[in-house]
Image (spheres, coloured by chain):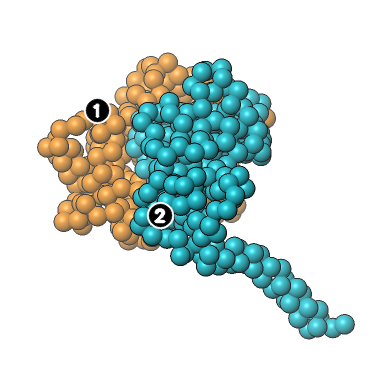
């Protein structure tokens, strides 16, 4: 099942073209990893999916992006962002307690009942593999958690608004290997019920968790294929070079 | 000359310059405390002026100043905060925005006597509020608006953009983000700015001279349309307009005004340090 369909996507920031003629599809319940060197447009691509780019100055976009066969331009941005959750590169807890961080999204979407909120928070924290570590101190500041815990808290916070699609923007770039493993484990579990797009600078991470992998270079989509194939027999020489660490 | 010598000279000159700043401030405070302290009695603070202001207390002037200043915050804080939120959260850099910012900077540079004249023409005469607490508060409110707007904008902009981004990414609207995430973290900064503005307003003479201050009114104002006495103007009157006022009454009045303003600045500093301690990012 195609979840997202992208046709002839071009994005500019002022005069600079960040993405060029991108065509690709994202399937339901897969993890699509996006790899490529810095400044290849990966993050811009990700932020296009929940229309975060349009908050920046000088953003311009052409082409068509469909979520469940509906043009996302026609959707209400807040409704779209509820459906398409995002986890940022650095752990970014809000200056609230652990509980309030996770409850925030549900609250702004109108959930007031305390019992329901407690249930939502517990479920989200369990899905992000954080519940056991924080269940006794939900009312302490989120900034007291370690970096890896904070990032899982951010995942829980995103899950609490019940999205269908999850966008991860280099979610492990600031984490140690053990925390990274926990986040990756969470991602693999989550793909049962969500569609995941993972932007990563870590080629090995793409190989570990991605069902399919896309390689971006200078704003162009060079190659997209099943991860196993991409990492054993890439079609394009540039893909091969990047995966082997010859540039980037 | 070698570098050690020039270093010593530079140090000495710079130190002297710094000392020269402290000196007048210290002298002003010392002289006022020394000459004004004997007047500091409970009666001085709570009695009306008597014998043509040559005896008695300063109660009506103290209360008048508090009313006027309180009124000024009541008008200036909501408007200033609203403008600050609009400017820092809702507008992007464009011509009109720059024009507004320029206007605010210039507003801060207008001499206070000009505000007085404006308040007199606009509130006292045009709106027919008369010389009243309302006119005085409105005039002072306009005067401290730039301080409140500038401080509030700085406070709002010091809240990291990433918090807003997270909030938007969860589907929050701009207003929800401002209300739940930004304002809570900006309030201490906003309060600090407001209190500094208030301190400034409490000491101003020219604007209230035109719009509210009574020469001699030995009773408390009953409504906002009444005139009132105010400390800065009262000080001016007993120092220059009434002959033979005891020195300690004059300096006592100055001391009360000074304490009032210092106290407000102190509150601002306390709030700021408390906030720094609690700051979580």
Q: Looking at the image, can residue A128 be seen?
A: yes
Percent across and percent down for residue B19 are 66, 71
Q: Colour of chain A?
A: orange
Residue at screen point 24% across, 40% down: A103
Left or right of B40, for residue A37 = right
Residue at screen point 39% across, 20% down: A76
Disc on res. A110: 1
Residue at screen point 42% across, 39% down: B218
Q: Colour of chain B?
A: cyan
Quarter of the rendering occupied by the N terminus of chain A: top left
Question: Which residue is disc 2 drawn over?
Answer: B44
Which is more toward the observer, A246 or B23? Answer: B23
Residue at screen point 25% across, 33% down: A107
Q: How many neighbours does mark 1 have within 10 angstroms: few (below 14), some (14-19), or many (20 or more)? A: few
SS type, badge 2 = helix
Disc on res. B61: none
Percent across and percent down for residue A80 are 37, 25
Q: Chain of mark 1?
A: A
The reply to the same-chain question for discs 1 and 2 is: no
Q: Residue A62 is drawn in which quadrant?
A: top right
Percent across and percent down for residue B162 are 45, 43
Up the image or down, A204 lies above or below B222; here it is below
Q: Looking at the image, can residue B163 be seen?
A: no
Left or right of A107, for residue B128 = right
SS type, badge 1 = loop
Which label lies toward us, 1 or 2?
2
Left or right of A185, for residue A205 = right
Which is more toward the observer, A205 or A103? Answer: A103
Q: Chain of mark 2?
A: B
């Amino acid at each position: 099942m195609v979840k997202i369909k992208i046709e002839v996507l071009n994005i500019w920031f002022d005069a600079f073209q960040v993405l060029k003629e991108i065509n690709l599809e994202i399937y339901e319940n897969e993890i699509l990893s996006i790899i490529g060197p810095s400044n290849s447009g990966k993050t811009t691509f990700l932020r296009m999916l929940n229309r975060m780019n349009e908050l920046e100055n000088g953003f311009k976009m052409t082409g068509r992006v469909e979520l469940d066969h509906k043009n996302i331009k026609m959707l209400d941005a807040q409704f779209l962002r509820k459906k398409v959750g995002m986890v940022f590169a650095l752990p970014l807890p809000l200056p609230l307690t652990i509980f309030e961080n996770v409850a925030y999204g549900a609250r702004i979407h109108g959930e007031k009942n305390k019992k329901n909120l407690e249930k939502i928070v517990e479920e989200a924290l369990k899905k992000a593999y954080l519940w056991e570590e924080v269940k006794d101190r939900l009312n302490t500041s989120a900034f007291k958690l370690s970096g890896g815990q904070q990032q899982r808290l951010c995942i829980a916070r995103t899950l609490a608004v019940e999205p269908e699609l999850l966008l991860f923007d280099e979610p492990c770039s600031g984490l140690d290997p053990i925390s990274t493993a926990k986040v990756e484990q969470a991602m693999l579990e989550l793909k049962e019920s969500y569609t995941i797009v993972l932007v990563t600078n870590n080629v090995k991470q793409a190989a570990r968790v991605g069902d399919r992998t896309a390689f971006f270079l200078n704003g162009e989509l060079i190659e997209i294929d099943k991860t196993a194939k991409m990492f054993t027999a890439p079609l394009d020489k540039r893909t091969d070079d990047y995966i082997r660490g010859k540039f980037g | 000359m070698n570098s050690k010598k020039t270093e010593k000279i530079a140090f000495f000159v710079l130190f002297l310059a710094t000392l020269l700043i402290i000196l007048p401030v210290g002298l002003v405070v010392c002289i006022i405390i020394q000459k004004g302290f004997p007047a500091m009695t409970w009666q001085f603070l709570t009695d009306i002026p008597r014998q043509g202001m040559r005896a008695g207390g300063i109660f009506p002037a103290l209360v008048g100043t508090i009313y006027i200043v309180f009124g000024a915050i009541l008008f200036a804080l909501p408007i200033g905060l609203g403008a600050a939120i609009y400017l820092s959260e809702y507008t992007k850099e464009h011509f009109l925005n720059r024009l507004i910012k320029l206007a605010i900077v210039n507003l801060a540079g207008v001499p206070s006597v000009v505000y007085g004249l404006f308040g007199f023409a606009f509130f006292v005469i045009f709106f027919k509020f008369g010389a009243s607490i309302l006119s005085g508060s409105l005039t002072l409110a306009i005067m401290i608006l730039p301080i409140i707007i500038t401080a509030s904008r700085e406070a709002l902009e010091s809240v990291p953009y990433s918090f807003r981004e997270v909030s938007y990414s969860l589907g929050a609207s701009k207003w929800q983000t401002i209300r739940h995430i930004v304002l809570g973290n900006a309030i201490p900064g906003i309060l600090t700015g407001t209190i500094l503005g208030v301190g400034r307003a409490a000491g101003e003479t020219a604007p209230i001279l035109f719009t509210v201050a009574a020469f001699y009114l030995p009773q408390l104002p009953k409504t906002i349309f009444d005139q009132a006495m105010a400390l800065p103007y009262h000080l001016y009157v007993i120092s220059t307009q009434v002959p033979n006022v005891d020195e300690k009454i004059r300096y006592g009045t100055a001391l009360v005004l000074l304490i009032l303003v210092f106290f407000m600045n102190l509150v601002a500093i306390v709030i700021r340090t408390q906030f720094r301690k609690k700051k979580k990012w």
